[in-house]
Image: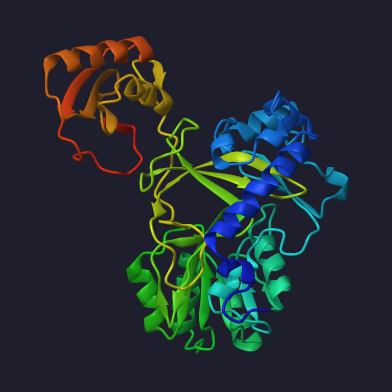
């Protein structure tokens, strides 16, 4: 095993990775089409024609929000699985409910690289404080730890004093779980006058890790605290990296995933640096996911990580993409605002701002334009009425004045 990274492919030239992913796309599509769900979604698609990002971008986005309906149509996994449930390793139920499988391959969820990046090495004992009840997060870590060669304390959540006792006796070198629960454990240990300074590393997820909280852990003797980002469907998507104790901005994408960032509510790929929805194509032989929209927002960082890993870097979690809201009894969708924008290629960013109070909604489309004339505003008002079936006002603003945060709809109403 490479001592710099868990997987030597993390250091390969970006062009080699891109070529390998593109070459694998036809086989992925062909294999997926053997599953009933993908056969419907990808009906008429020639797998041999999908050999590039451009070709992939013509396929529909299947969003996490679609899974419940798909799974009701074809239980338990929406017909998206190519391995039958009877041959899976575990079957999970997440809130929704949404059902997710786990296959038998090693490091099936791709968490070993994230553990390694957080300074965890073979033989290090991990206290795994993700939930073991019905959902997959704890088992994602179990799989990565087994691949890395690390014993695991299956601690789960809650029972803070028992957590402290286990840490005292079994002396884990690393904690894995949410950052808030790690803080609770350390605070309780201090109240009990128990020294847990042997817990040196932490890999955290599922909550924000503000710089102040990361520093709080460092101030109490931890040497490395890093984040990873994933979903119950995809496993580990990206993870933080560091060099000589300095955590680098953003997160490096996991291997064997193809990332797109699309305009919310659409399948259109964003311009580099624009905030949009994370869409992942996952090359998994048991549960392939093709243009899977996570509903989470991020943007690409322009340069590779200083740690030496060459995969794409995302800014981390930046909010939710589903901004659908109801105005005067009708739903307004991000895709509709994008459709308005597409009618006017001279515009920059646009944002529909909903104001007023319940039952008295007002819509104002803010649109970046170098042309500040009433004729453009008039045509935009017509487009709003045509596409949303609602009246809306227009404010033309200077180019570059709207924030790059992925928002197409801002609900600024007061409900008091």
Quarter of the image for residue 352 reads top left
Q: Which residue extends farthest left? A: 373
- Where 198 sits versus 336, above or below? below
Q: Nearer the viewer, residue 301 or 415?
A: 301
- Where 17 sits versus 274, above or below? below
- Where 345 sits versus 230, above or below? above
- Where 150 sits versus 343, above or below? below
Residue 57 horizontal/vertical position (percent): 54, 35
Residue 74 horizontal/vertical position (percent): 76, 30
> Residue placed at 15% from the left, 34% from the top?
398
Which image quarter holds the C terminus? top left
Quarter of the image for residue 221 reads bottom left
> Residue placed at 32% from the left, 70% from the top?
212
> Viewed as shown, does residue 269 lie left or right of 360?
right
> Viewed as shown, does residue 401 lie left or right of 265?
left
Residue 313 horizontal/vertical position (percent): 46, 58
Quarter of the image for residue 165 reads bottom right
> Residue placed at 72% from the left, 43% from the top?
28
The answer, for residue 122, to whether it is visible in the render is yes
Q: Which of 413 and 346 is in front in this view?
A: 346
Residue 375 horizontal/vertical position (percent): 16, 13
The answer, for residue 7, to whether it is visible in the render is no
Which image quarter holds the N terminus? bottom right
Give the mark count: 0
> Viewed as shown, does residue 121 lie left or right of 26?
left
């Amino acid at each position: 095993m490479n001592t710099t990274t868990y997987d030597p492919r993390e250091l390969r030239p970006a062009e080699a990775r891109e070529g390998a992913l593109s070459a694998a796309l036809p086989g992925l599509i062909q294999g997926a089409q053997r599953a009933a769900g993908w056969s419907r979604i990808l009906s008429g698609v020639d797998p041999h024609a999908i050999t590039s990002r451009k070709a992939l971008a013509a396929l529909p986005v299947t969003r996490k929000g679609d899974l419940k309906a798909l799974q009701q149509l074809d239980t338990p996994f929406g017909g998206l699985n190519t391995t039958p449930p009877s041959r899976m390793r575990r079957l999970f139920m997440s809130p929704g409910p949404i059902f997710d499988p786990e296959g038998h391959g090693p490091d099936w969820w791709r968490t070993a690289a994230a553990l390694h990046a957080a300074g965890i090495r073979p033989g290090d004992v991990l206290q795994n404080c993700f939930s073991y009840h019905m959902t997959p997060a704890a088992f994602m870590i179990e799989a990565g730890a087994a691949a890395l060669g690390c014993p695991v304390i299956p601690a789960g959540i809650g029972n803070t004093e028992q957590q402290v006792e286990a840490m005292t006796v079994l002396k884990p070198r690393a904690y894995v779980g949410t950052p808030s629960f790690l803080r609770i454990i350390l605070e309780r240990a201090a109240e009990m006058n128990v020294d847990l300074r042997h817990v040196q590393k932490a890999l955290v997820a599922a909550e924000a890790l503000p710089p102040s909280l990361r520093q709080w852990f460092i101030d109490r003797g931890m040497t490395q605290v890093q984040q990873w980002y994933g979903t119950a469907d995809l496993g580990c998507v990206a993870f933080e990296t560091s060099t000589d104790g300095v955590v680098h901005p953003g997160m490096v994408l996991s291997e064997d995933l193809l990332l797109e960032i699309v305009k919310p509510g659409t399948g259109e790929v964003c311009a580099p640096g624009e905030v949009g929805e994370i869409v992942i194509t996952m090359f998994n032989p048991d549960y392939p996911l093709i243009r899977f929209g996570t509903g989470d927002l991020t943007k690409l960082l322009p340069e590779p990580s200083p740690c030496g890993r060459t995969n794409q870097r995302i800014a981390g979690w930046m909010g939710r993409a589903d901004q659908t809201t109801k105005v005067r009894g009708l739903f307004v969708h991000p895709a509709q605002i994008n459709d308005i924008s597409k009618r006017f290629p001279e515009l920059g960013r646009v944002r529909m701002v909903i104001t007023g109070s319940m039952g008295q909604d007002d819509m104002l489309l803010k649109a970046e334009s170098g042309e500040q004339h009433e004729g453009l505003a008039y045509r935009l008002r017509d487009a709003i009425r045509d596409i949303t079936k609602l009246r809306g006002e227009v404010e033309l603003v200077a180019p570059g004045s709207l924030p790059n945060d992925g928002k197409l709809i801002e609900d600024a109403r007061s409900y008091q």
